[in-house]
Image (cartoon, coloured by chain):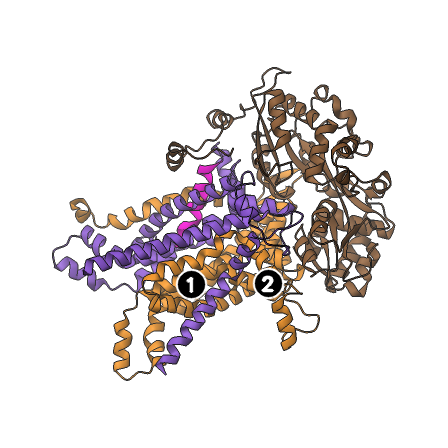
Amino acid sequence: MTHPLTRQELLRRATFGAALLSIPGFAAACGGDDDGGGGSGKNELADTLRFSNWTLYIDIDEKTKKRPTLDEFKQKFGVNVVYTEDINSNSEYFGKIQGPLSRGQSINRDIIVLTDNERFLSVMIDKDWTEKLDKDAIPNISNLVDVQKSPGFDPDREFSLPWQSGMTGIAYDAKQTKPITSADQLLEDPELKGRMTMLDNFSDSLGIVMLANGDDPSKVTDEGFNRALERVKAASDSGHIRRFTGNDYTGPLSKGDLKAALAWSGDIVQLQAANPNLKWGIPKDGGMIWTDNMLIPKGGDPYTASVYMNYVYDPKVAAKLAAYIAYVTPVKGAKEELAKTDPETANNELIFPTEETLSQVHLIDPAALKNDKYQEAWQAVLGA
Amino acid sequence: MGFLHRHAWLTPYLLLAPGLAWLAVFFLVPLGFLAYQSLESGSFDVGYAFDWAWGNYWDGIDRYREQLLRSLVYAALATGIALAISYPLAYWIAFRGGRWKSLLLILIIAPFFVTYLIRTLAWQTILADQGFIVGLLRDVGILGDGGRLLATSTAVVAGITYNFLPFMALPLYVSLEQIDQRLIEAAEDLYASKVQAFLRVTLPLSLPGVVAGTLLTFIPAAGDFINAELLGTPKQSMIGNVIQSKFLELADYPAAASLSFTLMAVILVLIAIYARAIGTEKLTG
Amino acid sequence: MRFIRRHVLTVYAVLAFAYLLVPIGIVILFSFNDPAGRFNYTWQGFTFDHWRNWDGVPGLRDAMVLSIEIALLASLLATILGTLIALALVRYGFRGRGATNLLIFLPMSTPEIVLGASLLALFINLKVFLGFTTILIAHIMFCISYVVVTVKARLIGFDRSLEEAAMDLGANEWTTFRKVTLPLIAPAILAGALLSFALSVDDFVITYFNSGSEITFPLFVWGAARVGAPPQVNVMGTLIFLFALTLMVVNVLVTMRREARAQA
């Protein structure tokens, strides 16, 4: 979509209601409902794949300003990809799409990506706002790593497929503090008072504390939840926890304002490149893992979307994606493929964690995410 | 022209029509929908239904009194500080700006070109714990030994002030710029000192600008959430954060809607009191 | 005494501008940074690379262009609509004056998230295509109030005797408006337009909900910051800032030249 604006286009845009950037969009405007997919037959590829993703979450070649894997997909299958980077938060994106979806309208997308450690992914599936994957078109689904094969919110993988995963652990500034290796230390070491942050999403923060308390975050009980909540609340009230952050811990951590923080593996890869003193590890009682999943929203074209998903599950393609995105790939064989061309990245444990590391990270209980009381209690700790 | 002469009473309505129509369609209708939502009850899973649920309002006021009050206090502080900072600045541009006035006005809004997030990140760099400014403040004794500026109420109020400064400065400028300098000269000719001339001539004439700037700063600042979110801790959360949370995280639309109306009502009451105190001619001429 | 006073004010103004613009300074500085890794937080080295490759991030330039287009159009239209309302409010008595004043303050007091979401609900119900037009509509809507309040501030202290004099000299109302009133309230209209521009180019929440697939500059930056906003974001911001400055400087120079020629 990086064509220069011609004069005609400028004029067109300047007159109201004429800014239409794509034929599917035009059709949608005229018809009022989804027509843009175009794939009428069951196994017919649509002309266009409309893919919404998080910003900068796919490989980019800075020299050519292109997205290599998308372009190869276009060439190989003859499908144009309209790639929109309009997701930057699960709750915000959901807030935006729940309007049309709850009224039975399409959101004009074939693939969107939501994270499994917030409730919205399950809500999409539970409310029947997603289309089923066309598994016949995804033979490469066999490359899905075992740990992702049967998550609680989609036990048969009928509606979702992982895009990338990330691990949540403890980051610390080795120049300012001794190694912080457990949640207990994080919450209780007096040296860290006012110099550490936790994440504002409860599956990361409370999940890790539950593990430290000996409770299981994949099967949350009221007692377990409350134990963890009380601990975090006390630390926050006393000022021990400086702030609850989204990914805005990255700035203070790299500048030395923080001695430690709950942090995501993908961020650390980038931060370490700039500041090698930053270390990261899974807490000794266990850390959390989250996965961004591809979904087909209602009204999207299941076949075309599934063909794309199959393409992305080819280890060669997955390797390219993993190398750029630097989060954890869900595709078996990607590491080996990447090792052929880029052994250094392939051996980066933050991007390709070992089996042992993966066994130490847990996924939050989807039922806990859907529990309104838990959510409200957590929001109250955040100040709302 | 003839038509308008015969029907002069029509003129105000014609002037108002396009703008008010725009607001009616694109603001009042959505607001009506919001009002409807505020009286629904239920839950996200089961669905919401209209229920004359006035309880949403009482509930909201009861539980979030603290955040509501805090929002008003922060907004008032930010407005006051913005006024103090902007008045001399607007004065200087109006009286000494000469032909460069427009350029200087652009400089005032220049920070908006780089988006809120980027300018906040820049401030976080400047005010970092290990940075120059905090170090200086610690040395001088204003900040304690382990003191910090970020993640405090100071940071939140400073953030709000900074981000709303143009909304105070520009209306002030507008009012000051139209003051005829000869009036000030006349006062001085009549043996008024500079200070007296300012207090007796300039200040009163600039009051409409002060009122405008105060309103344009206080009102949106009261509903702000982003400064508290990025620069504060849970202890600094404002009503805007609560509304965000209700809407986005909890998908509790009725709660978000009713809290919004509560906030709006409080703001309108405050405006009414303010108008009364100032004297309505200054507000509406 | 006078000498000192004159300079105190100027020094103060310089300090105030420094306060306003110091973050821009940081932004410009970091556009020359050479970060290893994707986050541009700490200074690592000087480079022109990101300036050379200023267009290297797909979507960034389009986002900036879109934001500017929308801001220009929105401020133009909001200024027109708002100025008309301000004129009506200050100069005429009419039924519903109080209600109109109330209506003007309401959009400013409504939290952005519920305003954005409710407007979206309207658009969805009307099955309007979400994109450029809906963003524009939303921006005009929330900017009108700011223009009204700003222009009103000017109209309130306005000396009607100038207009009366013009009319005594034979000008009709329209001519008087055009040649006397409008030039005198022009600074207020400009201020209103600038405020609208600032609001529009920086808006995130309302735009996010009503943008469909369009990405404006703030939307892009918020998303990019999650994984590290590239220095090209700084470059883009700097470019816009410099461009606006240049425009204004050129404007001043042209005016000066025109005046000089008129005097000659």
Where does label 1 land, which residue? B169
The answer to whether residue C65 is left or right of residue A90 is left
In the image, residue A227 lies at what x, y percent?
82, 54
Q: Which residue is drawn at 76% across and 64% down?
A: A193
| Residue range corresponding to the magenta coloring | C131-148
Q: Is residue B145 above or below residue C79?
A: below
Where does label 2 land, which residue? B126
* Screen quadrant of the C terminus of chain B: bottom left
Name the amino acid, label 2: Ile
Name the amino acid, label 1: Ala
SS at badge 1: helix
In the image, residue C21 lies at what x, y percent?
49, 61
Among the chains pictured, the one given purple colouring is C
Please state which of residues B282 and A29 is positioned toward the viewer in this rendering.
A29
Callout 1: residue from which chain? B
The answer to whether residue C133 is left or right of residue C227 is left
Drawing shade for chain A: brown
Residue A111 can be seen in this image = no
Please say if the residues under marks 1 and 2 sit with CB atoms less than 8 Å apart.
Answer: no
Q: Disc 1 and disc 2: Cα gap in Å?
A: 23 Å
